[in-house]
Amino acid sequence: MSLNEFDIIQQYFSKITTPRNDVMTGIGDDCALLVPEPGKILAVSTDTLVAGRHFLADVDPASLGHKCLAVNLSDLAAMGAEPCWVSLALTLPDVDENWLKKFTRGFAQLAEKHGLQLVGGDTTRGPLTITITVHGQVEADAALTRSGARSGDLICVTGKLGEAALVLKKLLDGDAVDEDARLALERPQPRVATGVALKGLATACIDISDGLLADLGHICSASKLKAELEKVAVPGSEATLNHEILLDFALTGGDDYELCFTVPEKFKDRLPEIAQQTEVSISVIGRMTEGQGIEIFDENGTRMDMPEQQGYMHFS
Ligand code: ADP
Ligand code: MG
């Protein structure tokens, strides 16, 4: 017998995360009732993942559960917010219990890791689509935004860039992909601890979801400044032997979910400590200056041509 909407909610969603003290009412009423900490503001972000557009339809459901939450957590990380609550709107073509079990396992494991409680959502029938809204909290004056960079600030990124886009290309081309590389695409780790640690240090921050150039470009326009990058300093992943190709992926590939941020030079010495504490590498890749747009310089200091397509766009 097939499960109805309420059975699905009861069986697969109602108790998959640990209850938090600041949830007055969670799943089961018309709204969730949540109690923010005094003095903090809410940081709210929504992302939708559509089968065939944001993920391959045959992806492992547990990886999908992980990833659709990870991309939302990455947005909280970029603002320096601490994750608290999440809601999940799920559109399913049919009730596949095996799929639901795996999906909720991947989702719940990442939620637990970051102390998030699933507090509500919606369950409907239609083409497979997942919409998640995460809610975080941050001190009223401490949120990191795109607009705070200042001329002279160093530009930094966490982790290694380009691997997810490279793996996706290989999968689409039907090439072999080893399991570790596949994790970069399917199980990105949102840099939540790093974002929180950067409060008070970073002047601007964004997560890299559409490619470094595209996302850093948002910091430039919001901060009304130019970015000057050193190509050799951009941390490409080791997934390929061909460094030139890799760098193109690192500059313009999507789906990395690393952080790109700016810091005043006086905080440079703090970066290794933050990297160590939050278990991710941090690379200084350039500097903000007066002007607009992005310029990239090679190892001889020569300005390079910019790639034509600077990142992923839905409507181009
Ligand atoms: P309503 O009709 O009032 O919108 P629903 O029948 O859609 O309520 O949902 C019942 C309860 O289950 C609500 O509290 C809702 O937030 C929750 N819910 C529905 N779908 C999900 C889901 N996929 N994940 C988590 N909670 C869900
Ligand atoms: Mg509803």
Image (cartoon, rainbow, N blue to C red):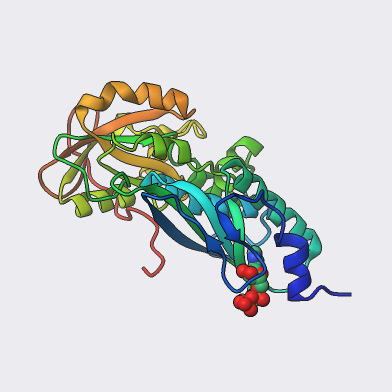
Figure quadrant of the C terminus: bottom left
Query: Where does residue 17 sit, x and y in percent of width and height?
Result: 67, 51
In which quarter of the view is residue 151 placed? top left
Q: Does 311 sit above or below residue 120?
A: above
Confirm whether residue 34 shows in the render.
Answer: yes
Residue furthest to the right: 1
As rendered, which of 66 and 273 lies closer to the eye? 273
Query: Where does residue 179 sit, x and y in percent of width and height?
Result: 66, 38
Q: Does 157 sit above or below residue 105?
A: above
Query: Where does residue 89 sit, x and y in percent of width and height?
Result: 59, 68
57 to the left or right of 219: right
Give me the residue at 74% from left, 54% from top. Answer: 102
Query: Where does residue 163 sit, x and y in percent of width and height?
Result: 49, 40
Give me the residue at 44% from left, 34% from top. Answer: 159
Give me the residue at 75% from left, 73% from top. Answer: 6
Figure quadrant of the N terminus: bottom right
As rendered, which of 316 and 202 lies closer to the eye? 202
Q: How many marks?
A: 0
Confirm whether residue 91 shows in the render.
Answer: no
Ligand 1 rendered quadrant: bottom right
As rendered, which of 305 and 127 lies closer to the eye? 127
Residue furthest to the left: 290
Give me the residue at 21% from left, 49% from top. Answer: 220
186 to the left or right of 202: right
